[in-house]
Image: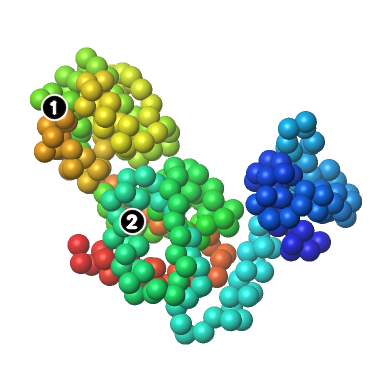
Amino acid sequence: MEISQLKVFLAVSELGSVSKAALHLNCVQSNVTTRIKNLEKEVGRELFYRKPRGMIISPAGRQLEIYARKLINLEKEARISLIEDNAVQGSLIVGAFESVAAMKFPVILSRYHELYPEVDLSFITASSTELCRQVANYQIDGAFVSDGYRLPSLDWWPAFFEKLVLVCPAGKNPEETAEKKGVLVFPKPCVYRKQLEAWLDRNALPMKQTMELGTVDGMVKCIAAGMGMGVLPLATVESTLPLNTVSVHPLEENLESVPIMFIKKKDILLTKAMEAFHEVLKDLNEKV
């Protein structure tokens, strides 16, 4: 069982077809097919169910996928440990959910790149659930997520705190809007939604949900259109306030602030690039 063989296996697993995996790996489809067949012959199990338009990973494939990610990560760490010196270099892939990506990441990335230009720094945006999955599967090095993702396989710590506010259509108050129009929420699990539900419960208001949305921008526009009210980070709606499209109201003190966690896999090598990233976060927090 070779590392290159496992990389082909993971590409097919993630992309769902031989043709897409071949394109991703920059090789011919027959090479991918042969490597998968040889791997199945070696382990003695069918790793994929073949369909007319793709490949679906089997239970045995799911089991191998866990070990394949670990082995590939160990190979990566072995190379890093042999070539890394005192210089902060290499690559670092960090993720964040939307509101953090929009408001916090530009400052973090700018400062990090200024201090450590030799690091190939990349970032992705996704939901906290998806980011947690990618960190757990060694696909990215770390991520900013909302609290609640304290899996045993992950290290986590508060990176910073986010101030939340009640957001209503312009000129409206939150209680009346929640009762008459309803609330706009993000899919579960979501710390903003959790705080909104706590506020509704505290004010004896029903959970009259009008819509579930996937983006902050979409929610702000729907609130401005009078479709309901919601809870959002203050930083994400401040730019809309001069336009008088929405109105902002404070949450109670014990509901207005939520921690944003930074997570990483427990068993990965803490590279100099990641250590430097931690230091940048710490420095920026101390200056706030």
Horizontal arrangement in the rendering, residue 86 relative to residue 21 (left or right):
left
Horizontal arrangement in the rendering, residue 24 relative to residue 93 (left or right):
right
Sequence-wise first label, 2 or 1: 2
Number of marks: 2
Q: Tell me the amino acid under the disc marked 1.
A: Ala
Hey, which quadrant is residue 288 in on the image? Answer: bottom left
Residue 62 placement (x, y as % from top left): 71, 45
Q: Which mark is residue 255?
A: none
Q: Residue at x 45, y 45 (%)?
A: 126
Q: Give the residue at mark 1.
A: 170
Is 184 above or below relative to 87?
Answer: above
Q: Assign the N terminus to one quadrant of the image.
A: bottom right
- Of residues 178 and 214, the one nearer the viewer is 214
User: Distance of mark 2 from mark 1, alpha carbons?
Assistant: 29 Å
Q: Give the residue at mark 2.
A: 105
Residue 178 placement (x, y as % from top left): 23, 21
Q: Residue at x 65, y 52 (%)?
A: 24
Give the residue furthest to the bottom. Answer: 86
Q: Tell me the amino acid under the disc marked 2.
A: Phe
Hey, which quadrant is residue 237 in on the image? Answer: top left
Pointer 2 local density, CA inside 10 Å: few below 14, some 14–19, many at least 20: some
Is 41 above or below relative to 255?
Answer: below
Pointer 1 local density, CA inside 10 Å: few below 14, some 14–19, many at least 20: some
Residue 14 placement (x, y as % from top left): 65, 46
Circle 1: element type: loop
- Of residues 250 and 114, the one nearer the viewer is 114
Circle 2: element type: helix
Q: CB of mark 2 within 8 Å of CB of mark 1?
A: no
